[in-house]
Image (cartoon, helix red, strand yellow):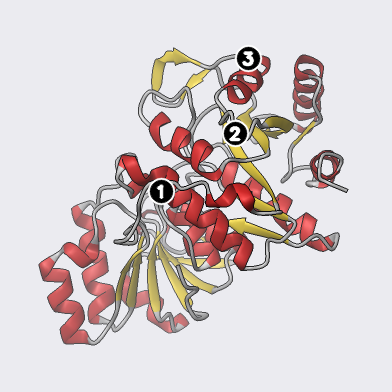
Amino acid sequence: MTAAATRRLLILAEGYSADPHHGKTMRGVVDYGQDAVVAILDSERAGESHKGIPIVGEVAAALAFAPDTILVGVAPTGGKLPRVWREQLQDAIRCGLNVENGLHDFVTADAELVDLAARCDVQLRDLRRPPADLDVATGANLDLPATTVLTVGSDCAIGKMTASLELDRELRARGVRSVFVPTGQTGIAIAGWGIGVDAVVADYIAGAAERLVVEGYRRGGEDVLLVEGQGSIIHPGYSGVTYGLIHGSAPHLYVLCHLAGDTHIEGFPRHPLLPLAELVSLHERVSLPARPARVACIALNTRKLDEAGARMAIAAAEAETGLVADDVVRFGPGRLVDALQAQLPA
């Protein structure tokens, strides 16, 4: 869980550099990462740019920008490594680039890539590889004096990590001793430490979450620990990791995230979303009896709406739930941080 040294990144985003859903790792690292992103690899958009960062069509073209590491910046469903991406990673290794990979297909388990990396004297790192000594939760985090805040959501890939990062940044700007606690591959790539809880054996997810909270406190989160949420408790595929995070991190407060305008789970049209008021009640009811948690505020992602529509969606969410709602990217995190601070210990 140690932080990596500052690097110069080439981000592999083949076919997804323009996709805010599956390209969320790329976007998260560009927007919040500590390392310099010098180029993006996507042959479908070669010659274009993203926020001033050049997009190249092949690894050789990126060498002019002097990267030292290639980061897999796409989060596809299932976390598999396609053949084309594997070939691009091979090219990068031959060019002397280290590899950072957040997929479920581990590059350190690929004998051919391991052999090539050894011959080219580069390092391979799998962000989702969990520590070998994980165990079940013990309750150690229940004794920490910090307030734990967990972002939860109506669906996957709707802004839980972004909300956590924005709230943490604003809290620290206000002098609060806050730490962002990474629980997924993108958060780990940004912060340089963490555990990818969706790659942990089910029995140990809560234990991993507990360990992360304790580690976040040790890293300076003496007032607030902003735990990055994963999945959704109503998701037909990924609810297990969400429950493990809820019970393992034992939050005092939730921030409920929702993509305004969505009506069903992305990719699962037979699974409708619940109204926000029901989601608020559901999360509060599934909290640990030893640590009852309440929803403090609503973080809406309004990227599908114009500004007028966004403000209407925010007002509607507030009227429905009785809680403060806002879009932390579009309008800033200030109002939500106000709502959180109003519920922190004096």
N-terminal label among 2 and 1: 1
- The amino acid marked with disc number 2 is Ala
Numbered badge on residue 290: 2
Q: Residue at x 59, y 61 (%)?
A: 216
Alpha carbon of mark 2 to alpha carbon of mark 3: how far?
22 Å
Numbered badge on residue 197: 1
**For residue 296, what is the image quadrant?**
top right
Q: Residues within 10 Å of mark 1 (few under 14, many from 20)?
A: many
Q: Between tags 2 and 3, which lies in front?
A: 2
Circle 3 residue = 278
Front position in the image: 223 or 137: 137
Residue 171 rendering spot, x and y as whole percentages: 79, 56
Number of labelled discs? 3
Q: Is residue 315 visible?
A: yes
Seen in the image, is 189 located left or right of residue 254?
Answer: left
Residue 303 rendering spot, x and y as whole percentages: 65, 36
